[in-house]
Every structure is written in C-alpha cells, then in structure tokens.
C-alpha cells in the first residue's frame, strides 16, 4: 500500500437491477480528481445516496485483493493473446485499437475497436497470413480481422523435425 494514497469508501444506492454496493477507491496527490475504484456488495443500509467516508482497513485489504486479482487476470490474458498473435507473426502494435484474439482451428480472429474511428490496421493487412476484415454488424465500433494460421515449419536439425522423420532424439 502506498503512503500517498488517500483511501475512501462510498455507498451507492441500488440502480436498475444492481443492488446497493460499496465502492472502495483511492486518490493520489499527483492526480487530483482521478479515482481508482473496486467494488463489493454491501449489506449495510444506505444513508443518503453516495456517502463518502474514510475506508476501513478491511475495506482497503479487500480493495487491494480485488485489484491484484484483476491485474493477475490481465497479465495472464495478455500473455495468452501475445502467444496467439505470434502464431501469425503479429503483435498488438500491428492493430490500431486491439481488443482480443481467439483461434478457431486454422483461423485466428482479432477483434479491434477501430471501426468507430474509421481506422484500418495497415500493418495487419500487409501480413502474409491476412485473410479478411469485416465490420461488426451488431456494434459499429468493432472490426474483425481474420488470419490463416500457417502450417508449422520443421527446421533441419530441430529435435521435432528429426523426430517427425523417424530419426528419434537420441544423441542430442
């Protein structure tokens, strides 16, 4: 926990189908007005709409645990995305507004939010594995790129290449 963080808790009233919740966050002196939040469900009563008070130690601990969980998930997801992009010789910087990537057999699909800004990922289109680009019919801000995943290349002297040719891996 940083000493410069000023933690607070706000009780928010029910909204739509969302129950009452407590949002814990912090502000730092170097970014006045900028708040970082995490939330959890509250069983306490609402006093008066959004009520701000100092956060308790237990709320701060719950907040830090939620932030850590989200950071861990993001790091794992980023590594998975990077590995998939690597299959086609791509990286996130090849796309104007990269969002996600998934593989379906011999196809790699990359979702972007570039359609809303009228952009096109030129580096992605230049990739030799590029197959198509489509605008999302359901959400006009999304565009989807499709790439053909190339067949694996076996390199002479590589353990997998020798094993594939029936040469085994003895003596390596």
Image (spheres, helix red, strand yellow):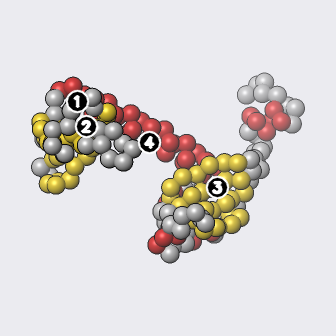
Q: Gap in Å between the C-alphas at discs 2 and 3?
A: 38 Å
In primary-sequence order, the first of circles 3 and 4 is 4
Give x and y (percent) for residue 6.
13, 41
- In the structure shown, which secondary structural element does the residue marked by tag 4 occupy? helix
Give x and y (percent) for residue 168.
82, 28
How packed is label 4: few (under 14 Cα within 10 Å), some, or many (20 or more)? few
Residue located beneath label 3 in the image: 109
- Residue at 70 percent of width and 48 percent of height: 104
Confirm or deny contact between disc 3 and disc 4 (CB under 8 A): no
How packed is label 1: few (under 14 Cα within 10 Å), some, or many (20 or more)? few
- In the structure shown, which secondary structural element does the residue marked by tag 3 occupy? strand
In primary-sequence order, the first of circles 1 and 3 is 1
Viewer-proximal residue among 19 and 125 = 19
Q: Residue furthest right?
A: 166
In primary-sequence order, the first of circles 1 and 2 is 2
- In the structure shown, which secondary structural element does the residue marked by tag 2 occupy? strand
**Considering the image in quadrants, where does the C terminus appear?**
top right
Q: Gap in Å between the C-alphas at discs 1 and 4?
A: 31 Å
Viewer-proximal residue among 46 and 8 = 46
Give x and y (percent) for residue 99.
50, 55
Residue located beneath label 2 in the image: 22
Residue located beneath label 4 in the image: 74
How packed is label 3: few (under 14 Cα within 10 Å), some, or many (20 or more)? many
In primary-sequence order, the first of circles 2 and 4 is 2
Could you say which disc has been placed on residue 44 in the image? Answer: 1
């Amino acid at each position: 926990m940083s000493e410069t963080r000023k933690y607070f808790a706000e009780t928010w009233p029910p909204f739509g189908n969302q129950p009452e919740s407590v949002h814990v966050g912090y502000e730092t002196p170097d970014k006045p007005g900028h708040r970082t939040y995490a939330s959890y469900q509250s069983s306490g009563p609402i006093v008066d709409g959004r009520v701000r008070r100092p956060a308790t130690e237990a709320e701060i601990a719950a907040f830090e645990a939620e932030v850590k969980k989200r950071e861990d998930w993001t790091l794992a997801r980023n590594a998975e995305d990077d590995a998939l992009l690597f299959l086609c010789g791509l990286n996130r910087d090849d796309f104007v507004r990269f969002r996600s990537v998934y593989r379906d057999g011999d196809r790699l699909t990359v979702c972007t939010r570039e359609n809303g800004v009228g952009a096109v990922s030129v580096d992605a289109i230049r990739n030799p594995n590029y197959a198509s680009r489509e605008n999302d019919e359901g959400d006009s801000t999304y565009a989807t790129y499709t790439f053909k995943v190339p067949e694996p290349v076996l390199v002479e002297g590589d353990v997998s290449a020798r094993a594939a040719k029936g040469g085994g891996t003895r003596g390596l």
